[in-house]
Amino acid sequence: MKILVINAGSSSIKYALFKFPSTKCLLKGTVEKIGEKNSLHHYSLKEQHQQKQILAIDNHQQALKLIVETLAEIKLSLNQLDAIAHRVVHGGEIFQQPTVINAKRIEQLKQLIPLAPLHNPANILGIETAIKLAPTIKQIAIFDTAFHHTLPEHAARYPIPDNWYQQNIRRYGFHGTSHAYVAKQTAKMLDKPLKKLNLISLHLGNGASACAIQQGASIDTSMGFTPQEGLMMGTRCGDIDSSVYPYLAEQSQLPVSEINRLLNQESGLKGIAGTNDMREIHTLIAKGDEKAKLAFNMCCYRIKKYIGAYYAALGRLDALIFTGGIGENDEKLRAKCCHHLENLGLLIHPKKNQAANGKTRFIHHNHQKIAILVVKTDEELEIAQQAIELLSS
Ligand code: ADP
């Protein structure tokens, strides 16, 4: 079986083609800067030949046509696919499972746009364009929020006026496909059924979130109503006193939209250190830059607090997982987040922790009961696998 995964953003489309049951990735690529004159298309066939094209791609339709042409390079047409699986960021309370898309579902997805105005419109555009190009092929939506539908009410609700909940104001959580994927990989590494494991998963990329997983199900996660809540991120501030909003609005006369932009796009690591790139932060720290050092320390401190909180929420912990661009590659950050946690049973082995190109591996001391792992995430593969499960159910 062959599944094409599409992750459509406002100006980019990431895609990957998987063959099952081998799970082999036959093609992976990205079309970037859609709508600009110098759009970029880079892709690799069978994890080998890297190709790069610079051309003008006006819209998502043209971008998808380019992807179809690339499929032709491996002698495949859209009609030979078993399904196209689309990443959709927000499924609200309606979509808690992978879902085959039809006209009614598209309408329901559109109703969710106010919950994710930056992401869902692009995801829907990707779906609608794919339907036009391949009307006979099943289109399946996989939701970032779905893994967290198991959050108990006490974790999902905000302590705010009760009727606000009727307006959908609650915690949803994101990065669900990544947390689900690394949890399954961890169960394989530990050779135990996922249903018996309690895990803390730390997805640390440009966006970052922690997830408490009890007996295989998400019971809490740091992102909430939007991806803004929780950990300090590349450009998002994460947890903050909500009174900062009215204070800034009154004192600086800034409109709410601008305050929101500043807290989402100019805060986090970037707000403190001037860059959201963790590698640059390490370069700056090596040069003695105090702001970069502060940003790193704040980031680690906030992750550590969530490790403690989720350990308490779970009661028993089997493994702590680091994933995402930072989680997979930054040994200094991993070491600092776990510093002095040996009394909790969390002790990193310095040699095992050393960078190994983000390879999936254990990094804890052998004699510790709680495993610590680096797991290379693969959201596209998880999306394809969930689509396959739906098709075979
Ligand atoms: P996104 O959320 O955009 O998918 P990624 O998961 O690719 O982001 O993570 C991007 C982050 O990973 C950046 O801050 C980048 O600096 C960081 N990163 C990548 N490689 C390393 C490395 N070797 N050491 C430290 N940080 C790294």
Image: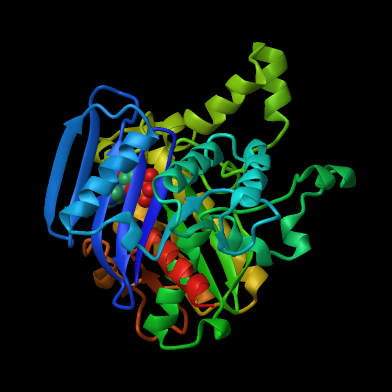
Vertical position of residue 78 compared to residue 25: above or below: above
Image coordinates for residue 23, horizontal then vertical, percent: 31, 72
**Render colour scheme:** rainbow
Residue 61 placement, left or right of 118: left
* Residue situated in front as seen by the camera: 136 or 181: 136
> Viewed as shown, does residue 333 lie left or right of 240?
left
Note whether 285 is above or below 208 in the view shown.
above
Residue farthest toward the top in the current orientation of the protein: 253
Look at the image and tell me whether residue 381 can be seen.
yes
Query: How many labels were placed on the picture?
Result: 0
Residue at x 53%, y 33% (from the top left corner): 264
Q: Is residue 183 above or below residue 222?
A: below
Say which quadrant the C terminus sits in.
bottom right
Outermost residue to the left:
49
Instruction: Locate residue 100: give its quadrant.
Output: bottom right
The spot of residue 294 in percent (x, y) is: 42, 39
Tell me if residue 309 can be seen: no
Residue placed most toward the observer, 76 or 52: 76
Quarter holding the N terminus?
bottom left
The residue lying at 33 percent from left, 51 percent from top is 15
Q: Position of residue 116 (x, y in %)?
A: 60, 40
Q: Residue at 43%, 58% (x, y): give it.
A: 137
- Residue 324 falls left or right of residue 22: right
Quadrant for residue 39, please give it. top left
Most foreground residue, 333 or 160:
160
* Residue drawn at point x = 34 percent, y = 47 percent: 14
User: Looking at the picture, how far across and down is residue 75, in whole percent?
Assistant: 18, 59
